[in-house]
Amino acid sequence: MSKRPNILWYCTDQQRFDTIHALGNSFVKTPVLDSLVKEGTSFTHTYCQSPICTPSRASFMSGLYPSRVHNTRNGNESFPGWPPVITKLIADAGYDCGLIGKFHLQSSGKRTEPRIEDGFSYWKFSHAPRDDWEEGHDYADWVRNQGGDLNKLRESEDRVPTELHQTTWASERSIEFIQQEREKPWLLNVNIYDPHPPFTPPKSYADQFDPNDMPGPHFKDSDLDAQAKLAHCDFQDEVRTPEEHDAKGAQARYYAMIAQIDDQFGRILKALEESGQRENTVIIFTSDHGESLGDHGLMYKGCRFYEGLVRVPLIFSWPGNFIQNSQNNALVEMLDLSATLLNLASVDLPDYLQGVSLLPILSGQTKDGEHRDFVRSEYFDALDPHFTGGNGTYATMHRTRKYKLCVYHGKGVGELFDLDQDPWEHNNLWDSPAHADIKNQLLAESFDAHVLLTTDVGSKRIAPM
């Protein structure tokens, strides 16, 4: 790269991989994202390193697996002093970095999340679209300055209207950042709260999606028995049928939130184009983890590793530099986004970094599908019992091209799925005698990966003894 590009990195919260029209979902409305898909490269098999916010974000912001960076829980008191987050490295390399929305490397419960050495010179914080913080909540202040009462709006029948919505606020702040005069390249990290529960889109968007028209979740009656065997593993919600969940209604509201995201994301891209900076700006769209949305009788998130919960969208666009209209099925981890961001900013990758840059794929140097042999995800006491009623579950996922192995450690249960034959994971082969050999092989591979990739061996060796 003769000139280091600007980087617009838009990250939603709890958005599944299968929520973009151009990538196969005819029920959603995402014309802006559809255009991004056509002008860029979409990684269709991208997996987060934890299905929970803080450990997932801690992972891709550090370039390490959650357990390796010692940050596996929501609600944590502090963030480790090492390693530096990638935005600090990028800022040190000469970028002007901005953060809009949530950061969530530490708890924002009953406090505004404390700043760390994050590298952001522009900081507009909003952990969630509630008026819970007395100071430091830029979004609530913005609503208040326009004469709105956020808590009353949230409780109203029409919900928070688009003109006062957090997603709109994020667009306003993004446009402000993009239009600033500067001589050096910039990185803008936009982290909105939607489509996170409680699934409350503005009425103007909710009215566009009829629950009766929705396809419903990936569910079979056998899922009830399957989940009963995992009942002692942490999850936010009880197992119910789609009808008991009103899953189609939740799906309609979820898609309505994504439609609003698409519109607001489009405003940012239009401002970028009008500023004359599009040609030298890499655009990235992704999410921190997915949402169960009724699949397998589950809603929300917790200690499971089903596709809807751990597989996320990841789209890159930089016309003239990256392959266009490409849907790449390589196995990708969000850690690879970390490495790619550092590469784009011309930062030498630290020797501890566990991500693998995607630039060879994006520039056409690597064949479709070639990248990783497996991806992994962790859940280590990630949610407080307040949300799950549990007492802290530990589990890992090891996913190869064909199989997915999930081990619920200390619980005596697990899952094995043949994703070629059973892509939506309804047929658990864990106890199948015919699959005992592959199960044992994957258990060994998963154990090796965990030991080799997450063991902390302590301080630097300075002498042979």
Image (tube, grey):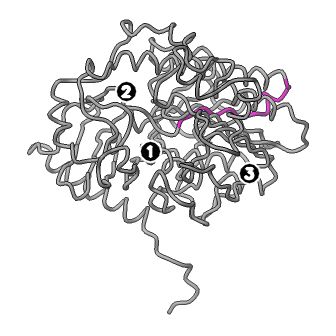
Which residue lies under the disc numbered 2? 293
| Outermost residue to the bottom | 465
* Labelled disc at residue 346: 3
**Position of 407 relative to 19 (above/below):** below
Left or right of 78: which side holds 232? left
Left or right of 180: which side holds 256? left
Task: Tell which tag, 3 or 1, sits nearer the viewer.
Answer: 1
Magenta highlight on residue 282? yes
Residue drawn at x 78%, y 55% is 93
State which region is magenta: 275-287
- SS class, disc 2: loop
Inter-mark Cα distance, 1 to 2: 15 Å
Q: Position of residue 421 (x, y in %)?
A: 24, 29
- SS class, disc 3: loop
Quadrant of the rendering where the N terminus is positioned: top right
Which residue lies under the disc numbered 1? 52
**Position of 385 relative to 370 (above/below):** below
Q: Earlier in the sequence, mark 1 or mark 2?
A: 1
Inter-mark Cα distance, 2 to 3: 39 Å
Q: Position of residue 412 (x, y in %)?
A: 17, 54
Residue 222 position by quadrant: top left
Magenta highlight on residue 318? no
Q: Do labels 2 and 3 touch, CB within 8 Å?
A: no
Q: Earlier in the sequence, mark 3 or mark 1?
A: 1
Residue 362 position by quadrant: top right
Q: Earlier in the sequence, mark 2 or mark 3?
A: 2
The amino acid marked with disc number 2 is Leu
Using the image as rendered, state which of residue 114 and residue 8 is in the foreground.
114
Structural crowding at the residue carrying mark 1, measured as other residues with C-alpha within 10 Å and reported as few (<14), some (14–19) or many (≥20):
many
